[in-house]
Amino acid sequence: MKTDAIRARTVPDREPGVPAEIEGPRERERLRTVIVEDPRDLAVLLADRIVEVIRRETAAKGNCVLGLATGSTPIGIYRELIRRYEIGEVDFSRVVTFNLDEYYPMAPDSIHSYRRYMMENLFDRVNIDPVNVHIPDGSVAWDRLDDHCAAFEEEIEAAGGIDFQILGIGRSGHIGFNEPGSPAESRTRLITLDTITRRDAAADFFGEDNVPLEAITMGIATILEAREIALIATGEHKAAIVRRAVEGDVSQDVTATYLQRHANAIAYLDHAAAGALTRIKTPWLLGSVEWTSDMTEEAVVWLAERRGVAILKLAARDYRENHLSGLLSKYGSAGAANGEVFNRLREKIRGRARLPRGKRALVFSPHPDDDVISMGGILRKLAENQNEIVLAYMTSGNIAVFDYDVQRHLDFVERAASTLELEEQRVGAIRREIEDGFRAKRPGAVDSERVQSLKRFIRESEAVSAIAAAGLPRSAARFLNLPFYRTGEVRKRPIDEDDVAIVASLIAEFRPDLVFVAGDLSDPHGTHRLCREAIDRALAEYEGPQPETWLYRGAWEEWSITQADVLVPLSQEELRKKILAIFKHQSQKDVAPFPGGYDDREFWERVQARNLETAAQADRLGLPEYYAMEAFRIERRG
């Protein structure tokens, strides 16, 4: 198991059990940051702080004023606050809240409404007085907007100002909906949404064309008047903008940089979101470091890429001129450092002969296509090595099927009704009923139970076809259909005991020697993260020998050569077959409903580019040359 180059330590003044913070030199950070390894730890840290602020402020002045955010990032915090309310640790009866923003126009009861989001994810579950809840009104008449925004500001002032403000950060660096160009003196107002913001929101609205053009947002000046601010970010896709916000100059082009001017603002980050910060990515540029094997590998690969030469061609001068004299001193010569890292990287490359053979392999796929997208190459090799393989599709993926795909399949069934000995009139009536429902449905509205089932069957049939194309028997597929996903909406329920029990039952039945798990955190709606939680909890309960866990990526990110423990080479023909297996997921082809707003390419195009680039990078470093490579990390439990 790979250990972190930057060591985690528990901050001394924290209680036992509180998540450890990753420490390192902070000279380039202009905004205080707290970094934890596991994104789930952020919910605990923030809930701790919010409960403390509520107790302190209500005792001191009779109320506590919170500024709240929406989206996927704060949901874990709200769930943790609900849990603490239910066990009596926190009282919301004297809490006043102000939400950052709301789309405009937006009906309060819409599934896209932030008011509805807050009611479902927090307010309906705690003892807050509805009078104390303030959310910008997306349904207010156009000619009353200015008065509504002014009144919102007056209500904040009347409440005594915001004690604690939660913020997310958009890919354009916005906080609230303060898009690039927002001035520091801005107040609550109507704003036109940036193209990037609307693209990132497209999945929530089932298409960018359905995303509102405008929104009401709390202004920069209003946000900066909060007495304490927490900026929260998780996932690899936030790393670049987090670095700009934390280490870059203050600029209205990235409104999160304004937080650098606040005396009590903190960025709370998981390790993935912090990955581009200097103290995480290249800490040797800031001073002396502990030269662990992992750190050495990172530094030597960085140096080779910076110099544009193979690892074994690096000279002592390269080390001295690039802040790596300490590493040179440790090894005594460039050749010794070069050789150790080269051999370490070469050992990661595992062709079919060095892959598991005769084992029981359980592959967990959050959606019905993640397996072939991320590990379609190794799947074929594992099958050729006579491993017993089960592919467990954890969710139905049915919300990611367009209505026209259902219509296409219904057309086939109706045309084939007589051949299939089905009642033609009944089939036709059902088809007309479903199509009438589609015409009446608003974008993003929940499908009927029948339509949800049809969409599930479409994805299941595609998954079976894909694994057959990857060289596995169709009988290898298991469809778990975990309950947390069965909302019919983009937003999902938290993982509960029912989800864990389904996963645990399969593990106990199959007794795997190794499991494959999605390790990417950039899934737009957190399904991969939730599935990982269910697997982790099930494995923690498992009484048998703990299997070796292989983490894969591919749909949104890929492991770098230094992050990976195993690099699986693919020939040109093997990559072609992998892509053909991905093509079997026809409902996700050409235009996928949820591609993620930060990459416009189809999934197969991303996979092809990443697998080719991993092999190309290995070649540039002087490692054996291959056409393409898949990358994996290994965790060993127990």
Image (cartoon, rainbow, N blue to C red):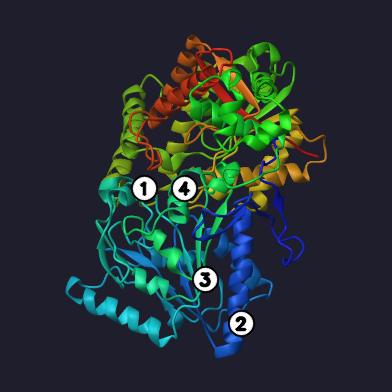
Q: Quadrant of residue 240?
A: top left
Task: Kindly state the secondary structure of the residue where label 4 is placed.
Answer: helix
On screen, residue 597 above or below 47: above
Q: Position of residue 280 (x, y in %)?
A: 58, 45
Mark in front: 2 vs 3: 3
Amino acid at circle 2: Arg
Residue of label 2: 56
Residue of label 3: 264
Circle 1: is it few (<14), some (14-19), or many (20+) Cα within 10 Å? many
On screen, residue 141 above or below 395: below
Q: Residue at x 61, y 87 (%)?
A: 59
**In the image, is 400 to the left or to the right of 207?**
right
| Residue closer to the observer: 212 or 430 | 212
Q: Mark 3 near mark 4, Cβ–Cβ under 8 Å?
A: no
Amino acid at circle 1: Asp
Amino acid at circle 3: Asn
Q: Residue at x 36, y 60 (%)?
A: 255
In primary-sequence order, the first of circles 2 and 3 is 2
Task: Kindly state the secondary structure of the residue where label 1 is placed.
Answer: helix
Q: Position of residue 372 (x, y in %)?
A: 52, 25
Amino acid at circle 4: Lys
| Residue closer to the observer: 28 or 34 | 28
Q: Position of residue 592 (x, y in %)?
A: 37, 35
Residue of label 4: 238
- State how far apart marks 2 and 1 are (Cα): 37 Å
Q: Residue at x 46, y 72 (%)?
A: 67
Q: Is residue 431 visible?
A: yes
Task: Kindly state the secondary structure of the residue where label 3 is placed.
Answer: loop
Mark in front: 3 vs 4: 3
